[in-house]
């Protein structure tokens, strides 16, 4: 009776696809992948960011001249810059007028003494001395008052100037800080936009570089899907029945082994 052997193999067209896949994959992987074309890149510092940096560096201490001047106004001699150059003229004119009035008053004492018959007497002398003493004291108080008034006005102006200079220094610093922040913000936005372009280019290069591999992956997945989903093709190999001669020779070989005299002698 004939004997047969059955082998499970994929369909021939699937086998052909598998061989083609292997050939293409070997060719693709034999060439090194150039990763330089999609290596990460960092956007350079924007011009406005550099300007912000330069402004920060050059503007350090820009408020100091204002603070120095403010400190000068707050010092013990700070008021002198605000003393009126005409103050002494005003004082002199006022004292001159005072002296005229004092002289009139002194003359009145003599006139009253003459009327009372005490002209040149001791009473007149006492009145003149007391009047002169009071007049001198009032003159000194008038002069001191005008000096004090001028000093007070100058000191007030010095205090005002001190506050103004300090505020100017703070405003300069605040404005500079605002400029730096604005430049940094705008420069950062521009740098981010540049970085986005570099990243998009990098991703595009990566996709183009990996596209053949992704295509091969899909190709391989399709072939594997066909193998698992389409079933196997059975190939049978039939072994024919032995001829009478083959049968006889086989039988003789078996029988020879049984009736071999040497075998029997050994036993």
Image: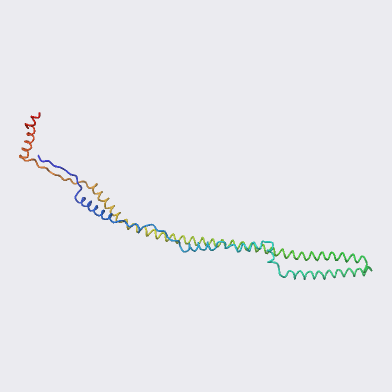
Q: How is the image coloured?
A: rainbow
Give the farthest residue toward the right: 117
Quarter of the picture holding the C terminus? top left
150 or 76: nearer the viewer? 76
In the picture, residue 1 is in which quadrant?
top left
In the picture, residue 191 is in which quadrant?
bottom left
- The picture places residue 210, in percent across and down from the top left corner, at 32, 56
218 or 246: nearer the viewer? 246
- The picture places residue 151, in percent across and down from the top left corner, at 72, 64
- The picture places residue 251, in percent across and down from the top left corner, at 7, 36
Q: How many marks?
A: 0
- 37 vs 228, left or right, is right
Indicate whether 250 appears above or below 174. Answer: above
- The picture places residue 159, in percent across and down from the top left corner, at 67, 62
- 190 vs 166, left or right, is left
- 208 vs 74, left or right, is left
In the picture, residue 60 is in which quadrant?
bottom right
């Amino acid at each position: 009776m004939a004997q047969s052997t059955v082998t499970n193999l994929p369909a021939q067209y699937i086998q052909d696809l598998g061989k083609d896949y292997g050939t293409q994959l070997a060719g693709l992987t034999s060439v090194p992948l150039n990763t330089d074309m999609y290596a990460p890149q960092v956007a350079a510092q924007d011009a406005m960011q550099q300007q912000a940096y330069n402004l920060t560096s050059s503007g350090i201490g820009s408020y100091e001249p204002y603070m120095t001047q403010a400190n000068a106004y707050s010092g013990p001699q700070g008021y002198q810059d605000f003393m009126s150059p005409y103050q002494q003229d005003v004082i002199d004119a006022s004292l001159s007028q005072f002296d005229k009035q004092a002289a009139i008053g002194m003359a009145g004492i003599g006139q009253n003494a003459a009327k009372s018959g005490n002209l040149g007497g001791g009473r007149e002398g006492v009145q003149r001395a007391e009047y002169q003493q009071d007049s001198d004291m009032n003159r000194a108080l008038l002069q001191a008052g005008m000096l004090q008034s001028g000093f007070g006005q100058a000191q007030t102006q010095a205090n005002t100037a001190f506050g103004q200079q300090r505020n100017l220094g703070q405003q300069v610093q605040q404005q500079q800080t605002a400029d730096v922040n604005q430049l940094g913000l705008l420069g950062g936005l521009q740098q981010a936009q540049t970085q986005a372009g570099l990243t998009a280019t990098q991703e595009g290069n990566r996709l183009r570089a990996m596209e053949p591999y992704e295509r091969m992956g899909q190709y391989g997945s399709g072939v594997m899907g066909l193998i698992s989903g389409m079933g196997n093709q059975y190939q049978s190999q039939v072994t024919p029945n032995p001829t009478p001669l083959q049968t006889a020779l086989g039988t003789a070989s078996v029988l020879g082994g049984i009736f071999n005299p040497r075998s029997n002698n050994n036993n």
